[in-house]
Image (tube, grey):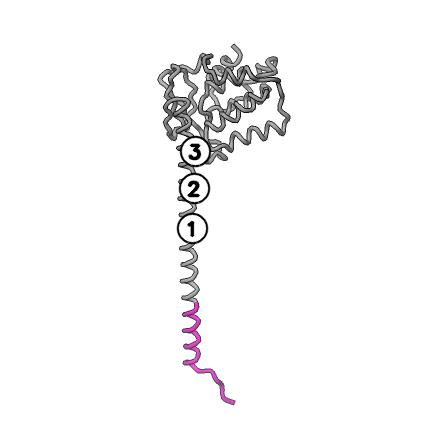
Amino acid sequence: MESNFSPENELEQLKIISENQEKLLKKLEELEKNDNEEEKNLKYIQKNINNLFELISHSINNKNNGHININTSPALNLINNNDNDNITTNIPIDTQNTENINNNTNSTNIINNIPNNNNTINEILETRDSKILFTVNEFKKFIGSIIDSPSASYRQNIIEKQVKQGYMFSIEQIGELLNLLPYMSEKKCILKLLKNSIHDYYHKQELLNYLTEETEEEKQALFDILFK
């Protein structure tokens, strides 16, 4: 009985298999290339969105607060200056990772005084009809909305809105908000809002225990601002 096997047939089969493998490899390379291009396009779109948020934030801050520069310094400096401060603020859009924002002015002293001539803040404080305390879940949601906000000015607006609605803060909650202070646009305004929104002064000595992002000097300076 004769066999159909022959070296020529085997070589032909191997050639076909080899060609098919080459086609598959080329297809995989094309798919990988397309994936890379799509990823680049998505990154480009995300970058444009981030830049748009920055421009909006920058425009709002320039209109309401004076000149604001954006940089990448991670340091935390709460520094006193004249009313017309030039505030340098870094606001990475990836707010899920607690970013660090540096606010520098010309003085070397930590903020000692909060100006009382801010009509917007005074209006917010004076128009509060009642005093409301957060539930645990409400405050978690409140903090989460601050962290997830796209810019420092949005974070400040969230706090202003809650204070205007009559919400007050415990000492522990004040500590959590102060830890986010580097990510706010107008620190003096935020400090004034918090100073006038504390409902349990008898626990004020515990504030230093809740401050985790500041040096000992900064902790004491913040304490003095709020309670002296």
Q: Nearer the viewer, residue 114 or 25?
A: 114
- Per the model, the C-alpha gap separating discs 2 and 3 is 13 Å
Quarter of image, res 164: top right
- Per the model, the C-alpha gap separating discs 3 and 1 is 24 Å
Say left or right for 58 vs 179: left
Secondary structure mostly taken by the magenta-highlighted segment of the chain = helix
Say left or right for 67 vs 1: left
Counting residues from the start of the chain, the first of labels 2 and 3 encountered is: 2
Q: Residue furthest top?
A: 228
Secondary structure under tag 1 reads helix
**Are the residues flagged by discs 3 and 1 in contact, CB closer than 8 Å?**
no
**Are the residues flagged by discs 2 and 3 in contact, CB closer than 8 Å?**
no
Residue holding disc 3: 92
Secondary structure under tag 2 reads helix
Secondary structure under tag 3 reads loop
Residue holding disc 1: 38
Please state the total of marks drawn on the protein image: 3
15 is within the stretch colored magenta: yes
- Per the model, the C-alpha gap separating discs 2 and 1 is 12 Å
